[in-house]
Image (tube, rainbow, N blue to C red):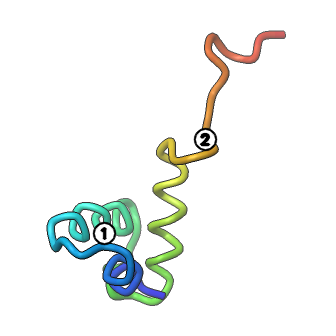
Amino acid sequence: MSALELTEEWFESDVVRAAIGAVAVHGATLGPMSAGAGYTLMHNWLNRGGPGHARVEGGIGR
């Protein structure tokens, strides 16, 4: 699934789709219509602090 297909399925606003689609192509050699860009979008978004992504305040210590 491409990032374009994913964002068209979930969002109505072109502005929102463009902003989210930019995350899909950040640091990749894929365009938003490339197969697999939807995976790249989810991977990049989750690694930027999406749900379930937390860090222990002050580090884990020893």
Taking the spot 35% from the left edge, 61% from the top edge, the residue there is: 23
Quadrant of the image for the C terminus?
A: top right
Taking the spot 24% from the left edge, 76% from the top edge, the residue there is: 12
**Looking at the image, which is closer to me, 30 or 16?**
16
Q: Amino acid at mark 2?
A: His
Labels 2 and 1: the sequence-earlier one:
1
Q: Are marks 2 and 1 in contact (CB under 8 Å)?
A: no
Residue 54 in the image: x percent, y percent? 62, 33
Residue 36: which disc? none
Disc 1 designates what residue? Answer: 21
Q: Amino acid at mark 1?
A: Gly
Mark 2 and mark 1: Cα distance apart in space? 20 Å
Q: Give the left or right position of residue 15, taking residue 1 as reference.
A: left
SS label for mark 1: helix
SS label for mark 2: loop
Question: How many marks overall?
Answer: 2
Relative height, residue 7 to residue 51 (above, below): below
Residue neighbourhood size for the residue with mark 2, other residues' Cα within 10 Å, grouped as few (<14), some (14–19), many (≥20): few
Q: Quadrant of residue 30?
A: bottom left
Residue 51 in the image: x percent, y percent? 56, 47
Taking the spot 38% from the left edge, 75% from the top edge, the residue there is: 10
Residue 53: which disc? 2
Residue 25 in the image: x percent, y percent? 34, 68
Residue neighbourhood size for the residue with mark 1, other residues' Cα within 10 Å, grouped as few (<14), some (14–19), many (≥20): many
